[in-house]
Image (cartoon, helix red, strand yellow):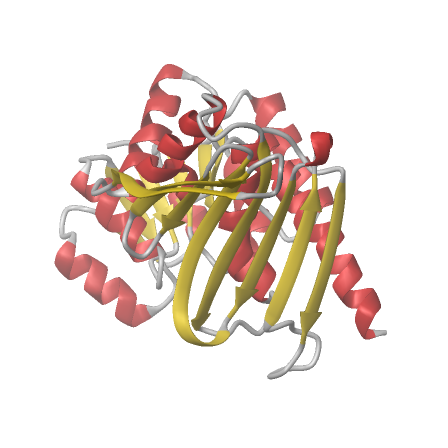
Amino acid sequence: MTVGVIGAGNWGKNLVRTFYRLGELAGVAEIHRETQKMLMTEYANVAVYQEFERLLKSDVQAIAIATPAHTHYEVAREALLAGKDVFVEKPLALSLVEAEELVDIAEQKGRILMVGHLLLYQPAVQWMKRYIESRAIGRLAFLSQERLKLGRVRSVENVLWSFGVHDIAVLLYLVGEKPLRVRAVGQRVLQEGIEDDVYVHLAFSDGVQAHLHVSWLWPEPRRLLTVVGSKGMLTYNELEQKVVLHKKRVTSDLNIYDKGSDMVFEGNDEPLLLECRHFLECVAQRKKPLSDGRSALDVIEVLENAGKQLKEDQL
C-alpha cells in the first residue's frame, strides 16, 4: 500500500474509498474526531492520524490531499518537502505564486505532482478531445460551459474558484492552449467579497473563444458543455454522461443546414477511479500526469486574472 490521504471530509472520503478499493490506502490524516471514528470502523486495517505531519513521517510513498482549498499550498508544500509524490484536489493553490512554488519544489525534488482536475478523466471529455482534433466538426469556433445549481456556498473562495476550476481545465484542454485574453464579470449576493454568480470569457488564437457561467445561486442543476465548429456541433450533458452530435451549421450563404442529431457517446466509467489509477501509474512509472502541476498553472493564471477583474469591478 502506497498512498496516504490527508482530509476525509466531503470529497476526501471518496479518495479514501477509491484508494482503499484499489488496495493502495496506507493511512489517513483527519482532524475531526467523528470522522476518525468512522474511518477506524470502516477501514480497520488502515492507520488514522490526527495530525497530517505524522502521516508524512510514515513510509507511504505518495500523499493525496483533500483539505479545504485555502490549505492546499501549505499541506502540499510540506508533503513535497517530505519527499512524497503528491496528488492535490483542485485548485492546486489559491494564487499563481504559491502554485509556481509547488511546481518548482516538485521538479527540484523529482516528485510527481498531480492536480485533481477530475473532468479531464471523464471518458466523454477524452472522446470529445479526440473528436475535435479529428476536425469532424470542422474548424473550432467556440465553446460554452454552464455549471449551475443551488449549491454549497463557500465563505473563503468564490464560486469561480469553487465550481469553475474543473471547467477552465477542460476548456483549456479541449482548445489545446492557454487563452490570450480573459474577461470576467460577477455578482455578490449572499456575502460581502464573495461572488455567487460569475461569467468568464476566454479568447484564444485563431479567433476561438470560450464562455463559462458558474453559479451556486441557481434554481436547478445544469452542467452542459456546447462545442461549435464550422461543420457541426457537440453537446455534453454531464448529468446524463451523454455526448450528442448535432449535424447542423449555417452555410456560407447564411442558410441553415440541419441533418438532425445523434447520440455519439455515452459513458459509464467512474472518472475518480480512472484518475486515481492514473496517479498510481504515474507514481510507479515516474511519468508525467495528464493534469500535472504545470498544466494547473495555466488554469490558476486564468482564475487569478478573472479574480482581479471581479475585484476591480466591485471597487
Residue shown at 43%/51% (left/top)? 52
Query: Residue 105 occupies which quadrant of the picture?
Result: top right
**Which residue occupies the extreme bottom position in the image?**
190
Residue 302, percent across and down? Answer: 68, 46
Residue shown at 24%/43% (left/top)? 270
Query: Residue 131 occupies which quadrant of the picture?
Result: top left
Taking depth in this image into account, of 311 and 222 the one nearest to the observer is: 222
| Count of picture labels | 0
Q: Is residue 168 above or below residue 125?
A: below
Q: Is residue 224 left or right of residue 25?
A: right
Q: Say whether residue 151 is visible.
A: no
Q: Is residue 306 left or right of residue 122?
A: right
Q: Is residue 157 above or below residue 130?
A: below
Residue shown at 38%/24% (left/top)? 283
Taking depth in this image into account, of 65 and 231 the one nearest to the observer is: 231
Q: Is residue 58 left or right of residue 312?
A: left
Query: Residue 107 occupies which quadrant of the picture?
Result: top right
Residue 255, percent across and down? Answer: 55, 43
Taking depth in this image into account, of 262 and 225 the one nearest to the observer is: 262
Quadrant that contains the N terminus? top left
Q: Say whether residue 121 is visible.
A: yes
Residue 234, percent across and down? Answer: 42, 42
Residue 60, percent across and down? Answer: 34, 34
Quadrant that contains the C terminus? bottom right
Residue shown at 33%/23% (left/top)? 281
